[in-house]
Amino acid sequence: MSENTMRVSYLTAPRTHKVMRIPIPAPAPGEVLIKVHTVGICGSDIHRNAEVLASDEYNIIQGHEMSGEIVDANGSAVFKNGDKVVAIPQTFCGECAFCGSGRNNWCRDLKIIGVHIDGFAAEYVALPERIVLIVPQDMPYETAAMIEPLAVSVHAVGLLADVRGKNVLVLGAGVIGNLAAQAAKVRGANVMIAGRTQYRLDFAKEVGIGLCVNTNETGLREAVTRAFGAGGADAVVECIGAAYSVNESFYQCRKGGTVVVTGVFSEKQSIDVFTMQDKELVVIGSMMYGLPDFREALKLASTGEVQLKPLVTGAFPLESFDDAFDAIDKKSFPVMKVMLQIVE
């Protein structure tokens, strides 16, 4: 077997990954070569795996949440071999007004690694230096791989501006909802998280979210009124992406409040425009993150202000990508964040 090849996992058809060997990439000028250690599985990966996306978007290497180790710094003045790193899974022009303001997620040339172009489910990746960040050497690879989803939540909460002392409801207790709740708490908000799966709410309690509501057992309106008063929450961060969740956000938000829509929707939704108008709500869409959000997520993870490690609930080898998806689908164990361990 050639020492110049590596294992990669291609999504070749719905619910079908195939491990292949391809040449190890050589880093171009301005790039570094990274040995990938851990890749997180995201909800968007699951959508693609379940045939939600177009069939012509198969035959791709998935994975956009990663951590790894630089093995060829390629003459960099910033990085050295052995640095533990994460990568921002975006390619962008770096020259437009959006990129200049830190809103690289608005770049017209934006491509998402692992979605539009090949991702991180590979033993090695060559990446531009500008999307690589060093993490503390003592941070576990599994924790580092969760900085990307934390950046999603940091961005969503950041769209609310100052939340100190405000009542914030997070709808959805999955990974993004959990991290949004933690990010809002770090910023001084009074936080409630609501969901339908008790073990996910138990994870929220474990990381310090005091107000956790199981809506299968307690009416959400009742819980919001009891905690925040009859007017409702000052702000709602929607992290579900289901047909009912945006409207539920409207119903639980006070007049003049703000709703941030963060969940990933696979199809168009019908929303209650009357309630939005009646309450004069500010409704903001949230998509990924900018560079400042990713750096803030790295800081919160490095200081321990946001807890990531408790949310890692499973790991599979690269060859078992499909088994990992099956475990997530069937909830074979209390599933929060499931990882691929790339290093043998």
Image: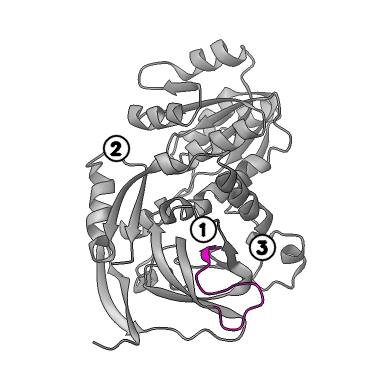
Q: Is residue 13 visible?
A: yes
**How is the model colour-coded?**
one colour
Which of the marked residues, 3 or 1, is nearer the chain's N terminus?
3
Is 321 positioned to the left or the right of 255 in the image?
Answer: left
| CA distance separating discs 3 and 2 | 35 Å
Q: Which mark is residue 343?
A: none
Tag 3 secondary structure: helix
Callout 1 amino acid: Gln
Callout 3 amino acid: Asn
Indicate which label's residue lies in the foreground, 3 or 2. 2
Most foreground residue, 126 or 331: 126
- Badge 3 is on which residue? 104
Callout 2 amino acid: Pro
Indicate which label's residue lies in the foreground, 2 or 1. 1
- Vertical position of residue 76 compared to residue 266: above or below: below
Q: Which mark is residue 334?
A: 2
Q: Which mark is residue 137?
A: 1
**Residue appearing at x 55%, y 35% in the figure:** 182
Graded by Cα atoms within 10 Å as few (under 14), some (14 to 19) or many (20 or more), the crowding at tag 1 reads few
Q: Position of residue 24 (x, y in %)?
A: 39, 83
Q: Position of residue 35 (x, y in %)?
A: 42, 72
Locate residue 252: give its quadrant. top right
Q: Position of residue 17 (x, y in %)?
A: 26, 67
Q: Which residues are magenta?
A: 73-87
- Vertical position of residue 168 compared to residue 36: above or below: above
